[in-house]
Amino acid sequence: MIIADNLHKAFKTKTGVVKAVDGVGFEARDGEITGLLGPNGAGKTTTLRILYTLMSPDQGRVLVDGIDPAIDAAAVRRALGVLPDARGVYKRLTARENIAYFGQLHGLPKAQIAERTKLLADALQMEDFLDRQTEGFSQGQRTKTAIARALVHNPKNVILDEPTNGLDVMTTRGLRAFLKQLRDEGRCVIFSSHIMQEVAALCDRIVVIAQGRVVAHGTPDEVREQTGEQNLEDAFVKAIGSEEGLHA
């Protein structure tokens, strides 16, 4: 389980101070997919970076399985599998070697790395490119490699920043099935998106963020009820108060 409690984060710019996250709070439960939804610039990525310890909040706290990263960041990182907004993979290594390298960083023995690599490659349908150098990979192949290496240590909590961004239809369908598999295994899954169909197809719970604040949250039905709209896209537009940045 991941809990975000009254998170604040501001950045200084040439023109003043920008509040990227302004009091965000929500709970992501085990065995559920929680969607972090909002227009571009709403504060989704900054919130996720705080959750996976890349940034520290100016105020508030995060708990991952009851552990505060301000007290034990290493333990939190061991409990997390993260696909960040940057999808970089090591181009001179094969997909298998990329995964193994991250397994070694987590201190896994070779036999366990090999076992986890096979399981992830099967689940993500990576067999045809697993032993190719990643230089020249398609967007989908890079994303699958990045997800596999993020999950090689079998974390209970998974955070994915727009995992289907730039992917074709068939690859997107495959990744959606994989996310449902993670949920069915009892993991806590958080992913960010601004694609309404994706949220409707996947999410058990939704957290809508606009201008750094949570403007609606709950199950899809609860969000529709909160906004008085029958259609989830209409509910999203009403919640954020603007159609700016909406992609459906």
Image (cartoon, rainbow, N blue to C red):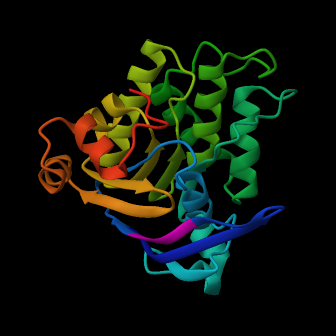
**Quadrant of residue 178 within the rendered picture:** top left
**Residue 112 image position (x, y, % from top left):** 60, 48
On-image quarter of the N terminus: bottom left
The residue drawn where x is 67% and y is 55% is 108
Residue 23: within the magenta? yes
Is 189 part of what is drawn in magenta?
A: no
Q: Quadrant of the C terminus?
A: top left
Residue 69 percent across, percent down from the top left: 60, 78
Q: Residue at x 45, y 40 (%)?
A: 193
Span of residues in magenta: 21-25
In terms of image quadrants, where is residue 226?
A: bottom left
Q: In the image, what residue occupies the spot 51% across and 62% down? A: 212
Q: Position of residue 126 (x, y in %)?
A: 57, 21
Horizontal side, residue 89 vs residue 169: left or right: right
The residue lying at 20 percent from left, 52 percent from top is 223
Is any part of residue 10 visible from this angle? yes
Of the pair 95 and 68, the residue shown nearer to us: 68
Closer to us: 182 or 13: 13
Q: Please say if 221 is above or below 231.
A: below
Task: Give percent across and percent down for residue 15.
Answer: 79, 62
User: Which of the 4 image quadrants contains residue 10?
Assistant: bottom right
Question: Vertically, is 177 above or below 57?
Answer: above
Horizontally, residue 4 falls left or right of residue 82, namely left
Tell me which secondary structure the magenta stretch mostly adopts. Answer: strand
The residue furthest right is 92
Q: Is residue 47 left or right of residue 56?
A: left
Q: Taking the image as drawn, is residue 34 in sight?
A: no
